[in-house]
Amino acid sequence: SQTIHQWPATLVQPVGSPLSLECTVEGTSNPNLYWYRQAAGRGLQLLFYSVGIGQISSEVPQNLSASRPQDRQFILSSKKLLLSDSGFYLCAWTPETETYGYTFGSGTRLTVV
Amino acid sequence: QKEVEQNSGPLSVPEGAIASLNCTYSDRGSQSFFWYRQYSGKSPELIMSIYSNGDKEDGRFTAQLNKASQYVSLLIRDSQPSDSATYLCAVMTGGGNKLTFGTGTQLKVEL
């Protein structure tokens, strides 16, 4: 069966520090991968999605970036965090060619102080 | 106009009652629709998907889709306190495999 792992679960980082969040999927190949952010009291905002290794599409221009160095690995990064980057970051996946709903990882709660 | 709209609630229903959650969407070309349940502090969990007009039932949950009216709903029968959560409506929009989410409706099931 397929599983999605996301870490760390919580993170407190100072303004201006770098960020690296990692997501991996097991039990499938060539998944579509997504990064969402959910700010307090707000909806889910799509940040990046990827349909293959090295293929990244950005939905919202900001100081975040994403990379997909391996087929089942998706990384969210920032060189310098802002206070507004605080939120609940969620990684999700779907099979390559199917239009099923996403399966989400357990999320990372990031607080920038 | 937001692409996917939901009433934020909270919607309060007594235990055992039917909870009705509604969602409207703006993209007439949308073909796939989903309901997620999100407990406080947790990630969203897919509970229902619907692709064609009409009703789809799964246990105590029924999803309803009306593409002409651009309307999706979720009915929860025999509501339980464990159903208390935020319910997110999601629509596959704009081509490709991308979901757009509503802001969610908070449901409270009271004893």
Image: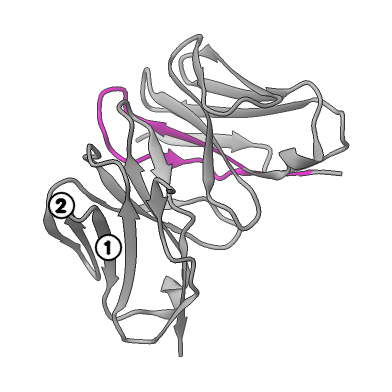
Q: With A47 as the anchor, is A62 left or right in this view?
A: right
Q: Which chain is home to disc 1?
A: B
Residue assigned mark 1: B73
x then y, percent, for residue A20 = 71, 26
Residue A102 versus residue B8 in the image, above or below: above
Cα separation, mark 2 vs mark 1, equals 14 Å
What residue did someone put label 2 on?
B68
Say if A37 sits above or below B44 in the image. Answer: above
Give me the residue at 50% from left, 16% from top.
Answer: A56
What segment carries the magenta color? A89-111
Q: State the image coordinates of residue A58 (x, y, percent, origin top left).
A: 53, 22
Residue A88: percent from left, percent from top: 63, 46
Q: Quadrant of the N terminus of chain A?
A: top left
Q: In the image, B82: left or right of B28?
A: right
Mark found first going from the N terminus, 2 or 1? 2
Q: What amino acid type is highlighted by mark number 1?
A: Ser
Q: Residue at x 51, y 13 (%)?
A: A70
User: Residue A35 has which mark?
Assistant: none
Tags 2 and 1 on a common chain: yes
Q: Mark 1 falls on what kind of element?
A: strand
Q: Nearer the viewer, residue B97 or B27?
A: B27
Q: Label 2 crowding class (10 Å Cα cut-off): few <14, some 14-19, many 20+?
A: few
Q: Quadrant of the C terminus of chain A?
A: top right
Pick the residue in front: B110 or B12: B12
Relative to A84, residue A59 above or below: above
Q: Amino acid at mark 2?
A: Ala
Q: Is residue A79 magenta?
A: no
Q: Residue A51, percent across and down?
A: 40, 18
Choose between A105 and B101: the one closer to the eye: B101
